[in-house]
Every structure is written in structure tokens, then in C-alpha cells.
């Protein structure tokens, strides 16, 4: 069974046929791979869901080191008020493709409508209050999704020229707005707290997935993702301080450009870049 079909690159079927059963066996999982659910929406990994195990598999061999780093981070996290996908076995590697068996988290990516402001605030506070001292070696560079320390140059030189002419001045203004934000005390920033990565049960957050982009950075970026993804700007504006919300709005204005930067930096096929630019154009015109 497959969920969320995409046109992202995919490991060869012959490699997957060997990786999945080995990873399930490593985790002590008895589920037949034929009965597993395949989740394809992730741009870096394919996820195979057994009864108790979620196997993450790199789409390309170049992603192996980053997957190992991310899993080390998840395994190093102190207990949180929700579950995270900790390792349940050693990594398996075949022809450069890496598979890591992890705990399958329970819950659904279907929050209450509207989501409770207190629950969202508590989610953000739980992530942002994590002790960074034991995590730094496993963190991604801040803003790595759209260029890391060179984010401004990447957006200006490699993303803006791909946009329609009438949107370029607006895009540059958004980039300059983010560059002008004052520095704030850094916190653990998840980097992708969107609806697909937050699981719910009984109106509460039961698990958080996909820690690949976690970094020590301005927590307002997470606020922007949560507020935008859950359509909760009004709720969070009432639950958080005004300065954080103002900074979050600046981050949110960058998000359409960040999608293009991710595709460009990842060397994605031209068709993927074209789709990202079209998505960015829609986002810029809508906001």
C-alpha cells in the first residue's frame, strides 16, 4: 500500500526489496513487507510502515550521512511530552542506500479544527526548551533548508532569477526583511513543524516526526511554520508575545522562496525545480 505518491527520485526497486525485510528483521518486526504501508511524500526519504516499525530509507546514497546525523539527534533527545521516532535497530546499507528502523509513532496528522492555541503553544515550548548542550553535534546548520549560512545569497542569486519578472522585487524585499531581523537567543528549532510531521490523538500532540532540519536558531521560524501550516495565526498571536509573532511573520514571507532553494540546492531534476517555482509563484501572489 502506498500513501502520498510523488515524483521524487526513488531507490531502485531491487534495492528496496532487500533493504526493507532486513530492516524489519533488525527491529524484531514480523510484518511481511507486502503488508507494509509505503509513505512517499518525503523529499529525502521513503518511509515503510510495519506494525511497530517505521523504516526510513534514503532516496539517494548522498543522503546517508544526513540520515545518520538526524537519527543520532532523535536518539539523543531527552524525553518530551510526545513521542519521537527513536531507533529500534542498527542501520542497514545496500548499494549506498541506507535504511534505519525506528519506532512507529501512533496518531494521525489531523488536528482539531481549529487547533487549540494552548496545545500549539505547549508543542513549541517543549521543542524550544530542549537542552542544546548534548545535541549540538547532531544539529543541522541553521536555515539549511534554504541555504544555511549562505541563505541570503542563495535566495538572491539562485532563486529570484527563476521567478517571473513581476515578482522579483517583492521576493528581494522579503529576503531583506529576514536579513534585517535582530539576533535573538537561540533555541532548538525543529525546522519543519508542519501538519504532516505532527501527530495527534484525542486532541493532543502524540508525536513529532522528521527532525532532519533541527537546528539552533530563532524559534520564530517554528512559530511561522506552525501558524501557517495549522492556519493558527490568530490563536498563536493571542498565546505568544508580539515580538515573536512579528518575527514569525517575516519568516513566513520567505517560505515560498525556501521551497525553490531546497530544490535547487538538492540538485533536484529540472521537473521538480519547475514545480517548486510554480508553487512559489502561487505563494507569492497569494501573500
Image: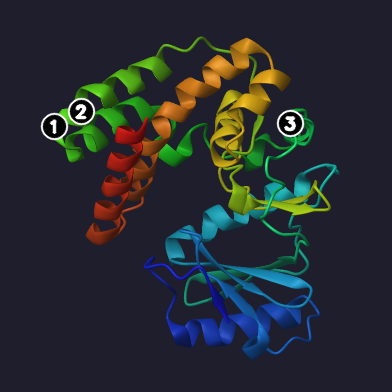
- Residue position marked by numbered label 3 in the rendering: 117
Residue 152 locus on image (x, y percent): 34, 25
- Residue position marked by numbered label 2 in the rendering: 168
Horizontal side, residue 12 vs residue 82: left or right: left
- Residue position marked by numbered label 1 in the rendering: 165
Does the image show residue 113? yes
Badge 1 element: helix
Nearest to the observer: residue 152 or residue 35: 35
Q: Are marks 2 and 1 in contact (CB under 8 Å)?
A: yes
Does the image show residue 210? no
Horizontal side, residue 194 vs residue 280: left or right: right
Mark 1 closeness class: few <14, some 14–19, many ≥20 residues within 10 Å: few
Q: Are marks 3 and 1 in contact (CB under 8 Å)?
A: no
Badge 3 element: helix
Quadrant hosting residue 80: top right
Nearest to the observer: residue 32 or residue 279: 279
Amino acid at each position: 500500500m502506498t500513501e502520498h505518491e510523488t515524483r521524487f527520485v526513488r531507490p531502485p526497486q531491487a534495492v528496496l526489496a532487500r533493504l526493507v525485510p532486513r530492516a524489519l528483521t533488525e527491529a524484531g518486526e514480523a510484518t511481511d513487507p507486502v503488508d507494509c504501508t509505503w509513505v512517499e511524500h518525503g523529499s529525502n526519504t521513503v518511509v515503510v510502515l510495519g506494525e511497530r516499525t517505521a523504516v526510513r530509507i534514503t532516496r539517494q546514497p548522498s543522503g546517508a550521512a544526513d540520515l545518520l546525523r538526524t537519527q543520532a539527534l532523535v536518539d539523543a533527545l531527552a524525553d518530551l511530552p510526545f513521542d519521537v521516532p527513536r531507533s529500534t535497530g542498527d542501520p542497514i546499507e545496500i548499494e549506498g542506500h541506507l535504511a534505519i528502523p525506528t519506532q512507529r509513532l501512533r496518531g494521525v496528522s489531523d488536528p482539531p479544527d481549529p487547533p487549540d492555541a494552548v496545545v500549539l503553544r505547549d508543542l513549541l515550548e517543549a521543542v524550544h526548551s530542549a537542552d542544546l548542550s548534548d545535541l549540538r553535534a547532531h544539529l543541522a546548520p541553521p536555515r539549511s533548508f534554504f541555504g544555511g549560512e549562505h541563505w541570503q545569497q542563495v535566495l538572491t542569486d539562485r532563486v529570484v532569477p527563476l521567478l517571473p519578472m513581476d515578482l522579483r522585487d517583492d521576493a528581494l524585499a522579503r529576503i531583506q526583511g529576514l536579513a534585517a531581523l535582530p539576533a535573538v537567543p537561540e533555541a532548538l528549532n525543529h525546522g519543519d513543524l508542519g501538519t504532516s510531521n505532527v501527530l495527534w490523538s484525542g486532541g493532543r500532540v502524540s508525536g513529532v516526526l522528521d527532525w532532519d532540519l533541527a537546528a539552533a536558531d530563532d524559534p520564530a521560524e517554528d512559530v511561522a511554520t506552525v501558524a501557517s501550516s495549522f492556519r493558527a495565526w490568530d490563536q498563536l498571536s493571542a498565546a505568544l508575545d508580539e515580538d515573536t509573532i512579528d518575527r514569525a511573520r517575516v519568516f513566513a514571507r520567505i517560505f515560498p522562496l525556501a521551497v525553490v532553494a531546497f530544490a535547487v540546492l538538492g540538485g533536484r531534476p529540472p521537473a521538480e525545480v519547475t514545480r517548486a517555482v510554480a508553487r512559489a509563484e502561487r505563494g507569492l501572489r497569494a501573500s
